[in-house]
Image: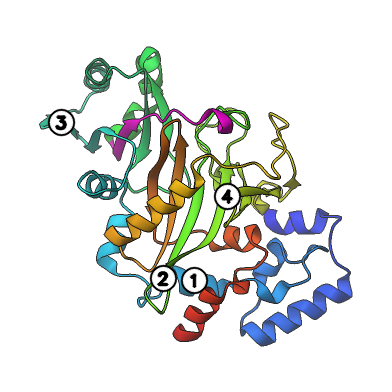
Amino acid sequence: MNRFKVFLRDKNKKSVFRIIKEVLILTYKKKEIPFYYFKYLYRRGVTNYLDYLSLKEQRTLQTHPKLHRQDLVTILDNKLEFALLAKGSNIKVPEVISYNLKSKFYFDSEISEIFELDELICFYEERFIASKLDSLFMRPIDGNSGVGCFKLYKDKVQQQLSNFGETILKSNYIASEVIKQHSDIDRIHPNCINTLRLVTLIKEDETTEIISAFMRFGVGNSDVDNASSGGFFAGININEGTLKKKGHFLPQFGGAEIYVHPDSGFPLQGFKIPYYKEACEAVLGAVKVIPDRLIGWDVAISIDGPLIIEANSQPHMQMSNIAHGGMLKNKAVRDVLKKLS
């Protein structure tokens, strides 16, 4: 309902006649009621609405068994399994400091059982001393969209765990080093790690192509950049590694289009992403280790180069749609959907 209210309030709508016409055409051609039309395609600037993936086509790419192997999906969608596999391969990821499976806490080769908040505070105080770090990034092992993620600070352990400790004890969490973001990206937004989302597709000829690239930015003091957690995203010119001119908030956060970061005022268009070529090489190399046919890779750009934060077997294809003005403009995407239909 909130998303529909955004549509109703939007002054950039096409005419009622044109909206009805396009919805009828999409219903006929896509063989589904195009509710997705009212998230973005109703806007005046979208003239090539038939180039956008329908909801059915998005789900086909995300879930079809000919694109996804269950054994690989299990690894991709579990942050701990992915991090441990990466450690034993050539995939560069942030260092894992510790993790817990509810009451069992793992550090190095030691296992501790922790049930009380005081014990938990002592455990992380010791981890900070051992790792010589000032902060840790905490993530639910099976979470998504940035939900449950936060930075744990050495000088605020007691205060933070008084609020989050019970959640950690009842859940499965992974604690990793906090990445030092490249200074060029800090100029846009320094309060969180702003990641690239690179989507790879193993094509019918068994070569791999990056079919979508966009960058996600946090706003305010949020610890995460996810658009589904209130941040925004901007498309990347795949061959050049530069940002496109517009950023986009998802409909549930107002659906606004912006041209500068709302906090820093930094213009998006033309920003050259540092280590972009290396980031692309990193995900193409990672596909060789985990050869699922469609993967969304989250890549951070550190001061020393790209690090793969995590991988997703069901990447948000609507954001790819918006970032690239319709994913059906891509021949590889059209070919795989044709093969699967």
Disc sitting over residue 63 in the figure: 2
Give the distance between the C-alpha atoms of the residues marked 1 and 4, in whole angstroms: 28 Å
Question: Is residue 174 inside the magenta stretch?
Answer: yes
Q: Is residue 15 above or below residue 289?
A: below
Residue 99 image-quadrant placement? top left
- The mark closer to the camera, 3 or 2, is 3
- CA–CA distance between discs 2 and 1? 6 Å
Q: Quadrant of the N terminus?
A: bottom right
Amino acid on which the number 3 mark rests in the picture: Asp
Could you say which disc has been placed on residue 241 in the image? 4
Asked which secondary structure carries label 1, the reply is helix
**Residue under pointer 1:** 59
- Mark 4 touches mark 2? (CB < 8 Å): no
Q: Amino acid at mark 2?
A: Thr
Earlier sequence position, callout 4 versus callout 2 = 2
Does residue 45 sit above or below 214 in this rendering? below
Provide the secondary structure element on which disc 4 rests: loop
